[in-house]
Image (cartoon, rainbow, N blue to C red):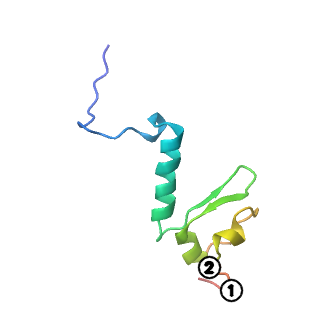
Amino acid sequence: MTRETSEPTGARPVVAEMDVSDQVAFLNSILESSTEYSIVAKDLEGTILAWNEGARRIYGYEPMDVIGDGAAPAEGATAAGGEG
């Protein structure tokens, strides 16, 4: 059996097929360009590893204040403690 693909000519490779440095660059570009949406990356223990501009705008916390912490602010909470 042969597998046919309907991949358009000039299609970009999927992330899994990229080398590690290209994956990091690709994911970093998503993190940096997403300013209307909050993106918070955590490890398996819940420690915040990444905090984008959207998260800063929505929650009001600077990345340096939350990266390395064990919990993200609650949905709707702001740095002043009020509801967003």
- Mark 1 vs mark 2, CA separation in Å: 8 Å
Q: Residue furthest front?
A: 21
Does 83 sit above or below residue 24? below
**Residue 44: % across, % down:** 72, 49
Observer-nearest of 63 and 79? 63
Look at label 1 and name its amino acid: Ala
Question: Residue 22 or 36: which is nearer the viewer?
Answer: 22
Secondary element at image label 2: loop
Count every numbered label the image shows and give the total. 2
Q: Is residue 38 above or below residue 29?
A: below
Q: Position of residue 55 (x, y in %)?
A: 57, 70
Q: Earlier in the sequence, mark 1 or mark 2?
A: 2
Q: Position of residue 15 (x, y in %)?
A: 45, 41
Give me the residue at 52% from left, 42% from top. 21
In which quadrant of the rendered image does the N terminus lie? top left
Residues under numbered marks 1 and 2 in contact, where contact means CB atoms less than 8 Å apart:
yes
Label 2 Cα neighbours within 10 Å, binned few <14 / some 14-19 / many ≥20: some
The image position of residue 8, as x and y in percent, is 24, 37
The disc placed on residue 60 is: 2
Q: What residue appears at the point 49 percent right and 36 percent down from the top-left corner?
A: 19
Q: Amino acid under label 2?
A: Gly
Q: Residue at x 59, y 82 (%)?
A: 84
Position of residue 11 relative to residue 28, above or below, is: above
Density class for disc 1 (Cα within 10 Å; few <14, some 14-19, many ≥20) is few
- The residue that mark 1 highlights is 80
Residue at 45% across, 34% down: 17
Left or right side of 48 for 7 = left
The correct choice, above or below, for 53 with respect to 15 in the image is below
